[in-house]
């Protein structure tokens, strides 16, 4: 169609229509250029006080300074992180509601529960901020100072031995450990987040937990005892704590926390956030804080986070199959 040959109302209507189309196409780019213009909310799908919450609050502080807008953390615990994840999946894809979960929320929860979100299709990966090794930790009143002694205690039948598991990922790891050491009678008790699970073990309501180095202060204060590290090598932070492999148990894994947006968020907004998270990961005070907790600063790309999520899905699927892990464990 040659617009020059049109006359009168038809020409005016076509010109108006083309103008409106051009304006509509320009909206996402303009919105991304102006982003952000108001407060940003980071949803943490756990109770306050856990490792992911600690990292999220540090990220929120740094992003707020960089983006010159308030960045607030909102805890939405429940259902192994599903409540918070579903809330973000339903949010407007405009970059103002973000999700900051540990990997198990995306990779494991959809394998165990019926969810309204797809771990790959419902979110736009932004960046992984931190990764960490995990510890097997006990209440100091538990009569075991090594994993071998713990296994002997659990097998003896002299007393029950209970795990506190604040996430489905920790619960699955407990089941895998029980399988590997041949102690099926260990009790797996669910808690609503890593903060409450730590309180239960410190208070003596449960004997054991798998946790990050967020428990480091309590370990040093003698309120918790570290029995083993789920890593390929010892940590310089706790050099006297042997790895699980050193104690004859082939278990090694790392946790991580990452930032995601709802699917459909403009790519320019995702790229802006990814760039800012990468800057946060290089800040000396952030790296110092992470080092004190034995965390590794990551700040990787969106593509690297997407690959990590897919890899985790396959890893958790195999673990769940090997342990016959069911909902409620």
Image: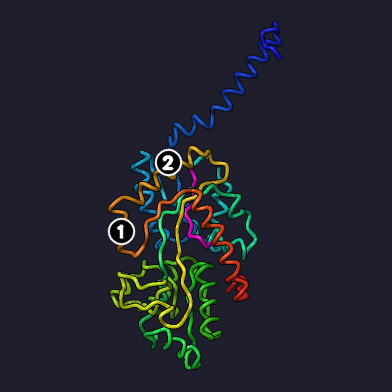
Q: Looking at the image, is mark 2 or mark 1 nearer the viewer? A: 1
Residue 153 horizontal/vertical position (percent): 45, 90
**Residue 289 — which label?**
1
Q: Is residue 41 left or right of residue 295?
A: right
Q: Quadrant of the N terminus?
A: top right
Residue nearest the observer in this picture, 277 or 40: 277
Labelled pair 2, 1 in contact (Cβ < 8 Å):
no
Gap between marks 2 and 1 measured at Cα = 25 Å
Residue 177 horizontal/vertical position (percent): 51, 78
Residue nearest the observer in this picture, 298 or 194: 298
SS under mark 2? loop
Residue 135 horizontal/vertical position (percent): 41, 73
**Residue 125 — which label?**
none
Magenta residues, start to end:
96-104
Residue position marked by numbered label 2 in the rendering? 39
Measured along the vertical axis of the image, is residue 265 above or below residue 59?
A: above
Q: Please rate how many residues cluster around mark 2, counting C-alpha atoms within 10 Å: few if below 14, some from 14 to 19, many from 20.
A: some
Q: Residue at x 61, y 23 (%)?
A: 21
Residue nearest the observer in this picture, 210 or 267: 267
Measured along the vertical axis of the image, is residue 28 above or below residue 119?
A: above
Residue 323: image quadrant is bottom right
- Mark 2 or mark 1, which has the lower sequence index? 2
Q: Residue at x 54, y 29 (%)?
A: 27
Measured along the vertical axis of the image, is residue 280 above or below residue 142?
A: above
Q: Quadrant of the C terminus?
A: bottom right
Query: What colouring style does the render use?
Result: rainbow
Q: Residue at x 59, y 53 (%)?
A: 120
Q: Please rate how many residues cluster around mark 1, counting C-alpha atoms within 10 Å: few if below 14, some from 14 to 19, many from 20.
A: some
């Amino acid at each position: 169609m040659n617009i020059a040959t049109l006359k009168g109302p038809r020409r005016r209507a076509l010109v108006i229509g083309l103008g409106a189309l051009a304006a509509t196409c320009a909206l996402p780019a303009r919105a991304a250029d102006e982003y952000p213009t108001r407060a940003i909310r980071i949803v943490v799908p756990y109770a306050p006080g856990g490792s992911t919450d600690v990292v999220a609050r540090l990220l929120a502080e740094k992003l707020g300074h960089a983006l010159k807008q308030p960045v607030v953390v909102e805890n939405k615990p429940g259902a192994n992180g599903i409540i918070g994840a579903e809330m973000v999946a339903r949010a407007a894809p405009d970059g103002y509601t973000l999700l900051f979960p540990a990997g198990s929320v995306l990779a494991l929860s959809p394998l165990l529960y019926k969810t309204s979100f797809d771990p790959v299709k419902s979110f736009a990966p932004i960046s992984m901020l931190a990764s960490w090794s995990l510890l097997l930790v006990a209440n100091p009143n538990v009569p075991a100072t090594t994993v071998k002694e713990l296994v002997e205690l659990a097998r003896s039948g002299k007393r029950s031995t209970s795990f506190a598991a604040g996430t489905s990922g920790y619960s699955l790891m407990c089941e895998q450990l029980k399988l590997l050491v041949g102690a099926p009678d260990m009790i797996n008790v669910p808690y609503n987040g890593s903060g409450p699970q730590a309180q239960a073990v410190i208070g003596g309501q449960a004997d054991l937990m798998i946790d990050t180095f967020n428990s480091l202060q309590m370990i040093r204060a003698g309120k918790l005892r570290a029995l083993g590290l789920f890593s390929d090598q010892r940590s310089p932070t706790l050099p006297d704590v042997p790895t699980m492999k050193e104690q004859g148990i082939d278990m090694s894994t790392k946790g991580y926390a990452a930032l995601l947006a709802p699917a459909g968020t403009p790519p320019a907004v995702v790229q802006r956030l990814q760039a800012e998270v990468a800057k946060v990961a290089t800040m000396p005070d952030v790296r110092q804080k992470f080092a004190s907790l034995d965390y590794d600063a990551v700040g990787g790309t969106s593509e690297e986070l997407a690959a990590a999520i897919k890899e985790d899905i396959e890893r958790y699927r195999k673990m769940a199959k090997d342990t016959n892990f069911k909902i409620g464990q």
